Amino acid sequence: MMGHADESDQVQSRRLGVRPFGLALMAVLALVWAGTATGSEIGEADVSDPVKQLQRARAENLKALEAIDSEAFASTSALEALERDLGALRSDQQAMEDAFVASAARRLDIDSRIAAGETSLTGLSGRQDTLRRSLIDRRTVLAEVLAALQRIGRDPPPALLVSPEDALASVRSAILLGAVVPGIRSQTEALARDLQELAELRRSIAVERQSLKVALAENTAEEERLSALASEKLALQAESERRLATERSRAGNLAERSAGLESLIARLETEIVSIREAAQATRKAEAERQLQIAEQLARARALAAATLPDKNLIAPAYAFSTLMGALSRPVDGETIRLFGAGDGTGNALKGEVVASLAGTPVKAPVDAWVAYAGVFRSYGKVIILDAGEEYHVVLAGMDRISVRTGQFVLAGEPVAVMGETRLAGAAALALVTDRPSLYIEFRRGGQPVDPQPWWKVDTSSGRASNDT
């Protein structure tokens, strides 16, 4: 039956996952025994790590902010360089467009000159055909005249001795030559002029064609060069615009990161200041509390000394270390947990637990000063007795407390009453019972000790210890 209860206690403790009650009461004892300086050190220890962490975080963020500022400066320089390059590319593009316009104008001029040359060549070709047909038409007459001239030149008629027939033929020849030669001469001269004009026109046309051909080739090469250069410039401009957009996006991201880091650093600085102020307030409150406790103890001792002249009533009658085997348990009941037993959380119990009945008075086991009397966290009402020689007795689980901090109590004097419910904070102790239970713990110099050697052999139950 009891083993089953122990298992249920352990299961309950694991489910709740909290520390044993004895460890929690160490905090109360530390506050009771420690002075103002100790409280200040505790306050500094509590806040030093968060402050250092925040300071490290702020230093890291400052380094990151400096790196981002450097990147932002480099990005700004790159943006300026890209904008200058884009401006130069746009200027070059405008110059090329102007060159394209000039090339197109030259091309139109060359085309017009080619068209004019073709028209002139067509007219000259027609003139050449006309002259050729005229020469062909006059070929017979000219041939006869030329033949007669050749005959006259080879066999001229005699000037003195002539026969009538020869004279008549000569006269006829002379008449014929006289009629034909002037016309032939004029036609010959006109023909010579036409032929010379035709030859000059042909040379001019040939020269013009050659010059137009050269100009056309040069214009075509210039257009090809400008087209290739324009394509290259457009590609460079597109790449520069892409890089510019990338740098602008990067600069925007860097600006956002910089703003975020600046805001974070400001928050960290605010938190550091807040933590330091809270630490100062905590140290001040701890110092005031320690001073108040000291004053209460002094007033209680002074009051006890003034009202009870017998020194045995304001100080333990015997040294606590000499009372082994002479003390009675604070409450009548069954001891269900002993010192060192498992508490259900994997730790050893620092005291012992006695199950009692509701309404049972809780008595001081020894002459002592009340070092603490009141509620402690979720553990209910707690009393800490100062028995001297650095010995303290911790009692927890009562329903009502009838003493106050600083009061001196005698052994067997009622200090509290058990309630109707189980031990307060039993969930934290993993000591689940169906009866009211009192937790008892002895400490010397802040370290728990086994209370068994101090109990009387003959207890109210008639046994040395109520072991389970």
Image (cartoon, helix red, strand yellow):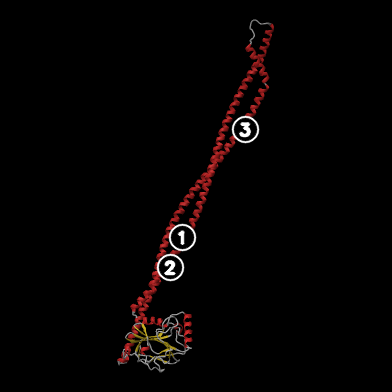
Of the two numbered discs 3 and 1 on the same chain, state the one appearing first in sequence: 3
Image label count: 3
Q: Which residue is mark 3?
A: 119
Image coords of residue 52 (percent x, y): 38, 69
Asked whether, in this view, residue 202 is left or right of residue 242, the answer is right
Q: Which residue is mark 1?
A: 255
The three-letter amino acid code for the residue at tag 1 is Ala
The picture quadrant where one finds residue 313 is bottom left
Which is more toward the observer, 459 or 106?
459
Of the two numbered discs 2 and 3 on the same chain, state the one appearing first in sequence: 3
Which is more toward the observer, 459 or 73?
459
Quarter of the picture containing the C terminus is bottom left
The picture quadrant where one finds residue 458 is bottom left
Circle 3: element type? helix
Which residue is drawn at the image coordinates 58% and 33% (left, top)?
209
Which is more toward the observer, 59 or 121?
59
The three-letter amino acid code for the residue at tag 3 is Thr
**39 lies above or below 109:** below
Q: Which residue is mark 2?
A: 267
The three-letter amino acid code for the residue at tag 2 is Arg
Mark 2 and mark 1: span between their CA atoms? 18 Å
Which residue is drawn at the image coordinates 67% and 14% (left, top)?
176
Answer few, some or many: residues within 10 Å of disc 2's Cα (few below 14, many 20 plus, some between 14 and 19). some
Whether residue 192 is visible here, answered yes or no, is yes
